[in-house]
């Protein structure tokens, strides 16, 4: 039974949102809704303009017999910056200060609205990088990795620090953990990552960068390529990190335990945009 055009538009939009980065032939929609390809093309044109105007993402059309349409989640730079600035205000609350100078993040990293936006912002960096997998270590970075993987429509893999019988055979490496340079171990199931994969690493917090560097070494053990590194937040580390060209959404610039103050600003991902804003002002 044919459905009304308004209903078709809603259903098509929902399907596209649920299948990011998947190439969907026009014949799929044409058969599903019993509509001519010309009508489907007009509908997709409406959806494409709406997605662009509302900052939802891109709708790419591929011509030819094997072509179709693909939805790419993408956040505009200024919209991403505005959202991160709101998070900076929340994180600067002195009530988030924990003993030892740590900053409480768990409520944000457990909030589905925050994870949804953070996932879109991080995934927007890699929408055209042909990513095969998203990697994180078994900490609070897991929900972030899952959110990014959903936007990129690729698997996410979890690196562990101890063996799990359910993981089967594993590849393990030793790495120097952060500024303490304490040697630790991390491992990944041999079945988790295909050889030759292009991998994005995400994590919740980065200090010296030792854990991220360990994941880089693990990726190399799988004869795969590190495409990029993006963390939710990083500290203002005084020293040289083992991996350069990493990005962060938030920068914890200063923590004063005595005064109970936290200074948080947008992370390195927004350096170029903030610099352009200064010049324009």
Image: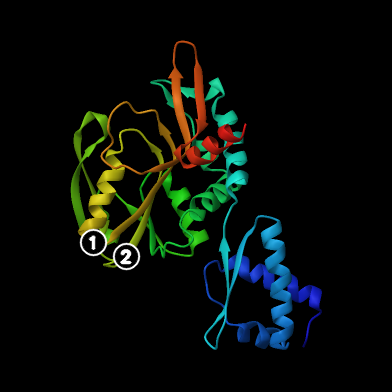
Q: Residue at x 48, y 65 (%)?
A: 153
Q: Is residue 99 above or below residue 209?
A: above
Q: Residue at x 54, y 29 (%)?
A: 91
Any mark on residue 197, and which? 2
Please name the colour scheme applied to the rendered image: rainbow
Any mark on residue 222, and which? 1
Q: CA distance from mark 2 to mark 1?
A: 8 Å
On screen, residue 209 versus residue 72, left or right, reads: left
Q: Quadrant of residue 85?
A: top right
Tag 1 secondary structure = loop
Figure disc tally: 2
Tag 2 secondary structure = loop
Residue neighbourhood size for the residue with mark 2, other residues' Cα within 10 Å, grouped as few (<14), some (14–19), many (≥20) = some
Q: Position of residue 218 (x, y in %)?
A: 24, 53
Q: Residue at x 45, y 10 (%)?
A: 258
Q: Position of residue 280 (x, y in %)?
A: 61, 35
On screen, residue 36 versus residue 108, left or right, reads: right
Query: Does label 2 or label 1 sit earlier along the sequence?
Result: 2
């Amino acid at each position: 039974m044919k459905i009304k055009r308004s209903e078709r538009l809603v259903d098509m939009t929902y399907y596209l949102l649920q299948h990011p980065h998947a190439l969907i032939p026009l014949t799929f929609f044409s058969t599903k809704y019993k509509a001519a390809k010309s009508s489907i093309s007009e509908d997709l044109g409406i959806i494409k303009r709406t997605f662009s105007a509302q900052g939802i993402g891109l709708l790419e059309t591929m011509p030819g017999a094997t072509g179709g349409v693909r939805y790419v989640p993408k956040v505009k730079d200024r919209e991403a910056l505005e959202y991160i600035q709101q998070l900076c205000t929340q994180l600067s609350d002195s009530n988030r200060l924990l003993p030892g100078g740590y900053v409480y993040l768990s409520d944000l990293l457990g909030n589905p609205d925050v994870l949804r936006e953070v996932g879109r912002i991080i995934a927007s960096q890699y929408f055209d990088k042909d990513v095969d997998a998203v990697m994180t270590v078994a900490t609070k970075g897991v929900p972030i990795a899952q959110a990014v993987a959903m936007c990129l429509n690729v698997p996410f893999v979890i690196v562990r620090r101890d063996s799990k019988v359910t993981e089967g055979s594993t590849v393990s490496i030793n790495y120097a953990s952060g500024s303490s340079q304490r040697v630790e171990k991390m491992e990944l199931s041999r079945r988790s990552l295909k050889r030759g994969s292009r991998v994005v690493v995400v994590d919740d917090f980065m200090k010296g960068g030792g854990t991220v560097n360990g994941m880089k070494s693990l990726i190399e053990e799988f004869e795969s390529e590190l495409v990029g590194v993006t963390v939710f937040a990083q500290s203002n580390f005084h020293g040289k990190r083992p991996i350069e060209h990493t990005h962060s959404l938030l920068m914890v610039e200063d923590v004063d335990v005595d005064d109970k103050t936290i200074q948080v600003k947008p992370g390195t991902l927004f350096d170029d945009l903030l610099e352009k804003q200064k010049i324009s002002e």
